[in-house]
Amino acid sequence: MSSTTHRFAWIAFATLLLAACASRMEPAQRAISDIEAALSTAASDAAKYVPDQLTDARRELGDLRATFDRQDYVGVLKAAPAVMERAQGLKIAAAARKAELTQALGEEWSDLAARLPGYMTTIQSRIEFLARKSSRKMAAGIDLDAARGSLSEDSSVWSKAQAAFATGNLGEAVTTAKSLASSLEGLASTLKIELKGPAA
């Protein structure tokens, strides 16, 4: 084979190699773009409910990009399906976790909503009882005016908790109600009574 023929053979081989690379580059780039789109769609809820899984998916996408930058398009195409499956699974995983948390918050709210109004009624009755002349000895050392003020504030907090629940903000409703429960328990201790939950 002459040197000219040899040279043309190499040129033809190089051309075929470049064509092969180009034919794989576009699908590899498209695969990465599809994964990026899937992650973008799921990112908001995933960040709230399954952040660790989102971090893993983003790391794997980063690895794919690095593989693409090395022009290992075959490697990208081989790994992409598993990364895409993980990216698409984020939305399902986030929805499942959200439902789980929502159910737990709902149950917690139901428990608090059943107890707190009774707590406030019990405390109000105790304040009225201690305010009687016949209860002066029992009321010794207790600031009833301060207790009334605290109960009034607690009633406002309860209204805020109910408003949050009514607008579907379960997290805020439960957090506010738990804070109220602590406040009422402290007030009950000051009034020397023990709060009890609703009758079974």
Image: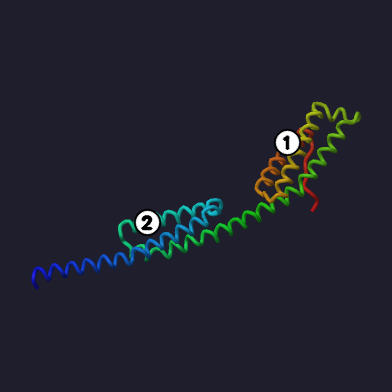
Q: Residue at x 78, y 29 (%)?
A: 146
Left or right: residue 165 compared with residue 5: right
Q: What is the residue that sits farthest to the left in this orientation?
A: 2
Considering only vertical position in the picture, is 55 above or below 88? above
Considering only vertical position in the picture, is 49 above or below 161? below
Q: Which residue is mark 1?
A: 186
Q: Residue at x 84, y 36 (%)?
A: 126
The structure's colour scheme is rainbow
Considering only vertical position in the picture, is 74 above or below 48? below
Query: What's the residue type where badge 1 is placed?
Result: Gly
Name the image quarter holding the N terminus: bottom left
Residue nearest the observer in this picture, 131 or 152: 152
In the rendered image, which quarter is residue 15 located in? bottom left
Residue nearest the observer in this picture, 158 or 144: 158
User: Which disc, if any, is residue 112?
Assistant: none
Q: How many marks?
A: 2
Q: Alpha-carbon neighbours of circle 2 within 10 Å: few (<14), some, or many (≥20)?
A: some
Q: What is the residue that sits farthest to the bottom in this orientation?
A: 1
Q: Alpha-carbon neighbours of circle 1 within 10 Å: few (<14), some, or many (≥20)?
A: few
Q: Which residue is mark 2?
A: 65
Which of discs 1 and 2 lies nearer the camera? The answer is 2
Q: Residue 71: x, y in percent?
A: 30, 59
Query: What's the residue type where badge 2 is placed?
Result: Arg
In the rendered image, which quarter is residue 25 located in? bottom left
Which element is circle 2 on? helix
Q: Residue 63: x, y in percent?
A: 38, 56
Mark 1 or 2, nearer chain start: 2
